[in-house]
Image: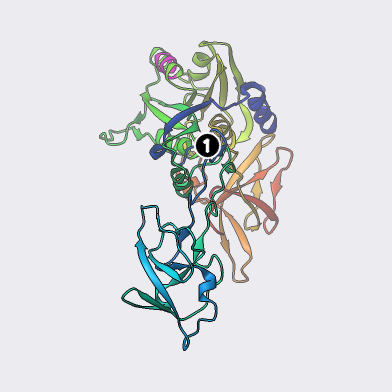
Amino acid sequence: MFRELIPFDSAKKLIFDKINPKPLGAEKIPLKEAHNRILGEDVITNLDIPPFHRSTVDGYALKAEDSYGAEENKPIDLNVIGEISVGEYPKIHLKKGEAVEIVTGAPIPSGANAVIMVENTQKQKNRLLIYRALTQDENIMKKGTDIKKGEILLKAGKILEAPDIGVLAAIGLNFIKVMKIPIVAVISTGAEIIEPGKNLSPGKIYDINAYSLSAAVINSGGKPIYMGVIPDDEAALETALKQALLSSDIVITSGGVSVGPRDYTPKIVNSLGKPGVIISGIAVKPGKPTTIALIENKPVFSLPGHPTSALLIFYLLVSPIIQRIAGRKLISHKAVKAILTTRLFSAKGRKTFVTVKLSRDKNQILIADPTKTGASGAITTLAKADGFIEIPANQQFIDSNEEVIVTLLTNKKV
């Protein structure tokens, strides 16, 4: 195992070529449940919004030409013939010299073409004094101003956020077609792993990977299913993997992929279906023992047990696959230039990823400092990091004070 490590870039291409990730299709769900889902079709509205001319102020609807010449010291006198509230369609038809009281959001009556704000008027019984002239359509939101019937309101592939949900509700939709969410089974392996909440007996550690990877799955657009911790037992692991393949679209395991006597995962995964293991070891640090299989068109990613290695390989190789299957656009990680504080060496013959913390010096120059906790087993390596730099496999080192490209792990401002 791992006698011929595949170069990282070749591995990335091979994963996409072999798995050929495609969306799972669409489903209709209630609009109330559609937040953060991926729109499965273009939404073309079948009505105008607003569906009628409406007032944008409290005041009086009138004919704009009836206000011409009105001034603070020379008001014009109109006859008030009624009032209009929201939620009712007016039967009134305004004639010359008439006005009707109206509230914000109420439909404009026939014959009116402007609304004067109440503070520019004075009402005396059924008579109205107006103290300024109006222009046609003043304080009126015209029918279809916001949304026009027949236009594409939202395009397929958009992540539905709160304003989008409001827009869809505005055109009367209570169900919407969205892309199906890929189900991702997450399995942790190892005799030393126990679930958080249980007593930590000597020699045991809590399951970090299942929780960090499940959160990363959600962030990538998938729905994780925690399959529990499987001890280093071939029969138990085979049973868990078969169940995971039956109940999910993608399987992620962590641990059991190195060269130890109890690292059974690659052998068992390879026995579960065709074509089986397609990658067994990648020329990368961290993450060399990463194993990837395709079992009857379902990808299985077997990641290293070390938390930082597992999560970094997830970001680099697994997340893009989940995003594509979820129908999402690939997350574009921002990159910045920074000055490296320390000489860094690559692992011989392997592309090396080094996590760094970013800060600014007294001259506001961005500097990159390798995270102090260097062991791949320490989850704080990634928790403390702002991003990572790459050292090519054919490059021995990057010198201190060299400019480097840092790929950011988050979108926070640096």
Residue 342: where, in percent of width, then height? 62, 55
Q: Which residues are magenta?
A: 238-244
Q: Nearer the viewer, residue 76 or 199?
A: 76
Residue that appears at 44% across and 16% down? 246
Q: Residue furthest left?
A: 199
In this picture, residue 251 sits left or right of residue 414: left
Residue 299: x, y in percent?
Answer: 55, 22
* Residue 258 shows in this picture: no
In the figure, residue 207 lies in which quadrant?
top left
Residue 65 rendering spot, x and y as whole percentages: 54, 72
Image position of 396 (left or right of 19): right
Task: Tell me which corner region of the image, top left, top right, bottom left or bottom right, holds residue 393.
Answer: top right
Which residue lies at the image location 43% right of the left edge and 75% below the top edge? 78
Q: Quadrant of the N terminus?
A: top right
Tag 1: amino acid: Leu
Residue occupied by mark 1: 39
What residue is shown at x 42% (from left), y 38% (from top)? 31
Instruction: Check residue 40 for magenta coloring.
Output: no
Label 1 crowd bin: few (<14), some (14–19), many (20+), radius 10 Å: many
Look at the magenta stretch and give its main secondary structure: helix
Seen in the image, is 17 located left or right of residue 409? Answer: right
Quick check: is 243 in the magenta stretch? yes
Where is residue 57? Give x, y as percent: 43, 66
For the point 50% across and 11% down, which residue is it? Answer: 272
